[in-house]
């Protein structure tokens, strides 16, 4: 049975007149960069509790709720990688006070790459766990099936409408649906606890949560990862849960390696959230990589 770990006590930072929730643990080390943990879509700082608990023994560890998620404000904005890039850059500059290792899962990984590429003064390095984000399409475009194309267009149009989007949000935020989704994307089923389900469910009750969900469908696609990697110059670690049903980890890992051959990479027996499924392994690999890069 998995032992519950209490969330680290946090605080709030005002950014663009919005309250942003964050946590800090551990002590500052002059010879070691701080770590900034960045969650994925629908998650929060709570998703890093197992990592903070252990990593704080060796590092100053920060975690932040992206605007629109967790305990942070959920204003009626257009959400994008550029928005979260600027939030993270300002957080590092104004709150942490020195360049950090950005450790991002899924959506948080894409935001981390945006920071390292376009606000490089804030990034000591980047560690990605099953990172989201688009690559440039190098394959020749095939002629789409007209029926499938029509269905896809209708589906996207419906999701952009307020009522269908709201109804879909009400469905996906149900505790039962959250648990079913986790069961699909987690290899280690023991990591799926009532506490985890509740941590994902709770922010969905906040005012504005449904609007954030809808905004994601309306947001323009961000800069391609291959372009961003071409702008990066810092150390990069990629950790892949190879049991992730949402992405082909080995195919995606090969793309990262092609565009950034100096990276370090590891493949784990985990799903979309390896940091929560196999925290001891992830913490050890992250620790060894950071300490090895500073020696």
Image (cartoon, rainbow, N blue to C red):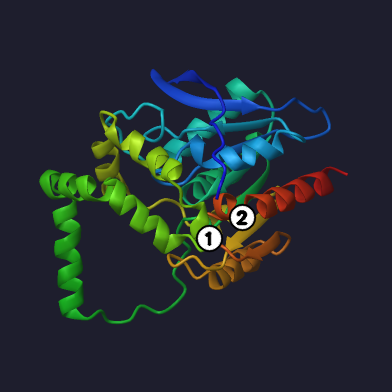
Using the image as rendered, state which of residue 95 and residue 241 is in the foreground. Answer: 241
Residue ID at (57%, 68%): 255
Residue at position x 60%, y 66% from top?
Answer: 269
Q: Position of residue 92 (x, y in %)?
A: 60, 28
Q: Residue furthest left?
A: 163
Which residue is labeled 2 in the image?
A: 278
Task: Indicate the quadrant where residue 52 lies.
Answer: top right
Residue farthest to the right?
A: 295
Pointer 1 residue: 188
Residue under the image location 54 percent in, 58 percent down = 130
Residue 272, placed above or below residue 34: below
Q: Secondary structure at mark 1?
A: loop
What residue lies at 30% left-to-right and 37% top-to-bottom? 204
Q: Is residue 66 left or right of residue 130?
A: left
Q: Nearer the viewer, residue 189 or 84?
A: 189
Tell me residue 31's x, y (percent).
84, 32
Point out which mark residue 214 bears.
Answer: none
Q: From this view, report whether residue 239 is shown above or below residue 143.
A: above
Q: Quadrant of the C terminus?
A: top right
Question: Which x, y percent locates residue 7?
Answer: 53, 31
Would you place residue 291 above or below residue 250 in this image? above
Task: Indicate the position of residue 104 as horizontal and vertical percent values.
Answer: 56, 46
Could you say which is closer to the camera, residue 258 or residue 60? Answer: 60
Is 33 situated left or right of 240 in this image?
Answer: right
Q: Residues within 10 Å of mark 2 (few under 14, many from 20)?
A: many
Circles 2 and 1, Cβ within 8 Å, touching? The answer is yes
Q: Is residue 123 visible?
A: no
Decide if residue 59 is on the left or right side of residue 104.
right
């Amino acid at each position: 049975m998995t032992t519950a770990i209490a969330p680290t006590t946090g605080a709030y930072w005002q950014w663009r007149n919005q309250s942003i929730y964050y946590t800090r643990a551990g002590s500052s080390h002059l010879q070691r960069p701080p770590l900034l943990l960045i969650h994925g879509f629908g998650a929060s700082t709570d998703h890093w509790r197992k990592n903070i608990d252990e990593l704080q023994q060796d590092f100053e560890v920060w975690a932040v709720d992206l605007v629109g998620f967790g305990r942070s404000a959920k204003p009626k904005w257009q959400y994008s990688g550029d928005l979260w890039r600027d939030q993270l850059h300002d957080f590092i500059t104004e709150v942490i006070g020195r360049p950090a290792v950005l450790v991002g899962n899924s959506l948080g990984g894409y935001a981390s790459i945006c920071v390292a590429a376009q606000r490089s003064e804030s990034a000591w390095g980047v560690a990605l766990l099953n990172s989201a984000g688009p690559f440039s399409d190098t394959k020749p475009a095939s002629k789409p099936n007209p029926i499938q194309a029509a269905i896809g267009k209708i589906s996207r149009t419906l999701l952009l409408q307020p009522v269908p989007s709201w109804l879909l949000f009400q469905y996906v935020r149900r505790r039962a649906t959250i648990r079913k989704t986790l069961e699909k994307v987690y290899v280690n089923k023991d990591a799926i606890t009532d506490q985890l389900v509740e941590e994902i469910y709770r922010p969905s009750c906040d005012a504005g949560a449904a609007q954030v969900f809808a905004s994601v469908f309306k947001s323009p696609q961000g800069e391609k990862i291959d372009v961003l990697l071409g702008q990066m110059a810092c150390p990069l670690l990629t950790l892949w849960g190879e049991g992730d049903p949402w992405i082909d980890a080995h195919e995606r890992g090969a793309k990262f390696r092609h565009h950034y051959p100096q990276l370090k990479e590891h493949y784990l027996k985990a799903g979309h959230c390896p940091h929560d499924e196999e925290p001891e392994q992830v913490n050890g690999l992250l620790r060894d990589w950071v300490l090895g890069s500073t020696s």
